[in-house]
Image: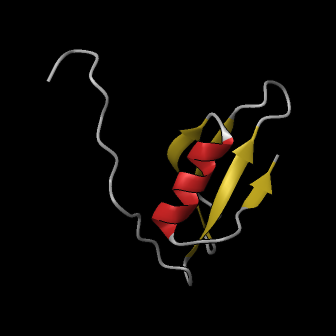
Amino acid sequence: MGLFSKKKKAESLSFDPEKEYPVLRCSICNGEQVAGFRDRATGHFTEVTLIRNEQELEEFKQRCNITEIVKEY
């Protein structure tokens, strides 16, 4: 593996829908989007991946087995 080789992505992400929900955090300043999970009890956000385009968002949804995602600004 070289210094700049691409990392392999995990096949699927598992999360407990009763404890967490998927969130897409969006910056209003620069448009950066980060996908992750927010804990329902504490509100803590766990960052999973940077979303740069629609294709990466769809891949995240497929890995989590979800159809919709909440956007937070």
Q: Quadrant of the N terminus?
A: top left
Instruction: Establish if 28 lies above or below 66.
Output: above
- Residue shown at the point (78%, 55%) measured from the top left: 71
Residue 30 located left or right of residue 10: right
Q: In the image shown, does 3 or 15 lie closer to the viewer?
A: 3
- Residue shown at the point (50%, 67%) measured from the top left: 64
- Residue shown at the point (56%, 38%) measured from the top left: 50
Residue found farthest to the bottom: 18
Residue 1 visible in this rendered orientation of the protein: yes
Q: In the image shown, does 20 or 51 lie closer to the viewer?
A: 51
Q: Quadrant of residue 43?
A: bottom right
Q: How is the image coloured?
A: secondary structure
Q: How many numbered tags mark residues here?
A: 0
Residue 52: x and y in percent read 63, 33
Q: In the image shown, does 38 or 54 lie closer to the viewer?
A: 54
- Residue shown at the point (71%, 68%) measured from the top left: 68
Residue found farthest to the top: 3
Residue 46 visible in this rendered orientation of the protein: no
Residue found farthest to the left: 1
Residue found farthest to the right: 28
Instruction: Establish if 51 lies above or below 12.
Output: above
Residue 13: x and y in percent read 41, 64
Residue 45: x and y in percent read 59, 54
Residue 60: x and y in percent read 53, 55
Q: In the image shown, does 66 or 38 lie closer to the viewer?
A: 66
